[in-house]
Structure formats: structure tokens, C-alpha cells
């Protein structure tokens, strides 16, 4: 499998996982069952129609629409394409243009209100940095893991400076990079754990030993300490982008982030698993920016 094929699959899986997971974002496991008694099996309704629980709300999220996870990953990609490296000020300029899920209480809101692209966050331990760090894994290789971790730091610090957030961003970037290199699952796991640090590695290792059907009960993704490790564990346990997305969607919690992060890793690892019909839906609703971004980033990653 060529690198550009893996990169394209990574971006396609990220975007489709994001849109699949949005359908149950922030629902409890019980609420997922109430809204979708038969479970999530894909896009549940006509593409472009409002997701049922958002009908009549201030913003009617659409079936097939991507969220800030994809938007911010594309923002990072634009900065990398312009500079050929990760620089927090350049990434910050792109993040200032992001509009989705921008409201008080999220780290990006504070960043946008300050309006300084060079700002370095002193704290913040959410998963916002991790959800946009897959492009770092495309551009940086595991043989220079110190550079990859530093690049993940540059990606994170405009909005997230806490140790959990920084470790999560580095773990995702490391997993994506190792998967793009075609490494076996145990090596992808090892790179993610080394890049993410001791605390992140401990949780990921715990999850790798738990039956998939029990993960929802034991590690519900409603805190940064569980969201990213769960995404990595699902990707490596299933080795399937769509299966990762559906498991995340049916768990609930921060389903779109788990699904987008995990699917990106699984797509890079096993490109053949990416769901083509889901790609068609997401492209029709959102445009093809994620496809063009992947192709462009893969081109400079091969230099």
C-alpha cells in the first residue's frame, strides 16, 4: 500500500468517523439506546436532514455533516502545507478561522476571543488538540519521534497546554505516523504509548486487555483521560475504520472525537476498510476539502 493511499484513507476515515459519531455526541449510553433502539449502523436518516435530536435547535446539525474535529484537522493541514513544518503561530492563524462548535466553555473560544495566533495556552486538558493532530503524523516520521512529539506540542499549544492534552496529541500523531508506515499493530501501539507518555500509555494498555463489548461500561468517553485512549484502543483492536466509528457512535459520550481519531488511525493502518458509501455522503454534504488536503499533504510528506 502506497503512502498516498494510506494518507487519503486516514483523512477520509477521520471525516466519515466524525460525521457518524456526531449523531450520538454527548448522549449517555442509555440515551443512545432511546434515540436509536436498533443501534447506529451508519447514517441514520436521509443525508443532509437534521439529526433528529437537533431538529428545531439553534443549530441543526445535519446527517453527514462533519464537526470541529475535521475543521481543525484541516486547519492544521493548511498550516503544514504552507510552512512544511509545524509552527504554533501558523497553526494558530488557521485555527482563528474555525467556526464550528465555537461557544463559551471550549478552549478554542478563549483562543479566538484573545485573537493572538502566537498565544501559548498555559493549561487546558481537553481532547481538542488530539482531534486535530493526525496531520502531524502524516508529515513527521516515527524514526525521529522527538521531532514528532515537538510538532504535536506546536499543534496543541494555541489552545491546550495541559499535560494530558499534550500527551494525547502526541499519542495520536505517533499512532497515525506508525500506521502510515505500515507497521504491525503491536508497533503502532508501542509508538503511541512512547509518544503519549506514561499516564496515556498506562490507560491505553489497560484498554487493550478489555473485551471490546465491555469498553463502554468501563471507560465511558466523557473525560480527556478516556477519550483518546479509547479511540486508539478501538482502532487497534478492530483494525477497521467503520467498525471503530460504529462502536464509538453506539457508546455515546464524546462519540465524534472517539470516532474521528480512532477511524483516522484505523484508516491509515487498514485503508481497504474505509467505507466508500460514507465517503460519498460526507463529500456531498461538506465538499471534498478533506480529500484535496490529504493528497496535498501526502505529496510533501514524500519529499
Image (cartoon, rainbow, N blue to C red):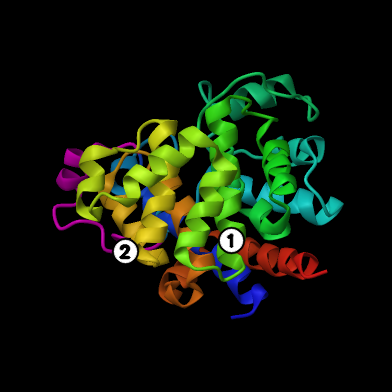
Magenta run includes residue 156: no
State which quarter of the image contains the C terminus: bottom right
Q: Nearer the viewer, residue 280 or 59?
A: 280
Regarding residue 128, the answer to whether it shows in the image is: no
Determine whether label 1 and label 2 are within 8 Å by CB.
no
Residue at 75 percent of width and 52 percent of height? 78
Residue at 57 percent of width and 58 percent of height? 176
**Residue designated by label 2:** 42
**Mark closer to the observer (1, 2):** 1
SS type, badge 2: loop
Range of magenta residues = 26-47
Residue at 31 percent of width and 63 percent of height? 42
Residue 30 position (above or below residue 303) = above
Image x and y of residue 161, in percent = 63, 25
Q: Earlier in the sequence, mark 1 or mark 2?
A: 2
Drawn side of residue 126 relative to residue 253, left or right? right
Image x and y of residue 158, in percent = 70, 30
Amino acid at each position: 500500500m502506497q503512502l498516498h493511499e494510506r494518507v487519503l484513507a486516514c483523512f477520509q476515515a477521520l471525516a466519515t468517523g466524525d460525521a457518524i459519531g456526531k449523531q450520538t455526541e454527548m448522549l449517555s449510553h442509555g440515551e443512545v439506546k432511546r434515540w436509536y433502539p436498533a443501534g447506529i449502523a451508519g447514517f441514520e436518516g436521509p443525508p443532509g436532514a437534521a439529526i433528529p435530536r437537533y431538529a428545531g435547535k439553534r443549530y441543526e446539525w445535519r446527517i453527514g455533516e462533519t464537526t470541529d474535529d475535521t475543521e481543525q484537522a484541516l486547519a492544521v493541514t493548511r498550516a503544514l502545507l504552507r510552512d512544511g513544518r509545524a509552527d504554533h503561530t501558523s497553526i494558530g492563524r488557521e485555527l482563528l478561522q474555525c467556526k464550528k462548535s465555537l461557544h463559551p466553555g471550549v478552549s478554542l473560544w478563549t483562543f479566538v476571543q484573545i485573537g493572538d495566533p502566537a498565544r501559548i495556552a498555559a493549561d487546558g486538558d481537553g481532547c481538542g488538540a488530539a482531534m486535530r493532530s493526525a496531520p502531524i503524523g502524516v508529515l513527521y516520521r516515527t524514526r525521529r519521534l522527538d521531532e514528532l512529539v515537538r510538532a504535536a506540542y506546536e499543534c496543541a499549544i494555541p489552545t491546550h497546554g495541559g499535560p494530558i492534552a499534550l500527551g494525547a496529541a502526541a499519542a495520536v500523531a505517533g499512532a497515525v505516523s506508525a500506521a502510515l508506515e505500515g507497521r504491525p499493530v503491536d508497533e503502532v501501539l508501542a509508538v503511541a504509548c512512547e509518544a503519549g507518555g506514561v499516564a496515556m500509555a498506562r490507560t491505553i494498555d489497560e484498554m487493550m486487555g478489555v473485551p471490546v463489548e465491555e469498553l463502554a461500561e468501563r471507560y465511558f468517553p466523557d473525560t480527556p483521560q478516556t477519550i483518546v485512549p479509547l479511540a486508539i484502543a478501538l482502532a487497534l483492536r478492530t483494525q477497521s475504520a467503520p467498525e471503530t466509528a460504529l462502536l464509538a457512535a453506539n457508546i455515546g459520550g464524546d462519540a465524534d472525537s472517539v470516532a474521528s481519531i480512532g477511524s483516522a488511525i484505523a484508516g491509515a493502518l487498514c485503508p481497504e476498510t474505509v467505507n466508500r458509501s460514507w465517503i460519498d455522503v460526507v463529500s456531498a454534504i461538506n465538499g471534498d476539502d478533506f480529500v484535496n488536503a490529504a493528497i496535498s499533504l501526502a505529496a510533501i510528506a514524500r519529499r
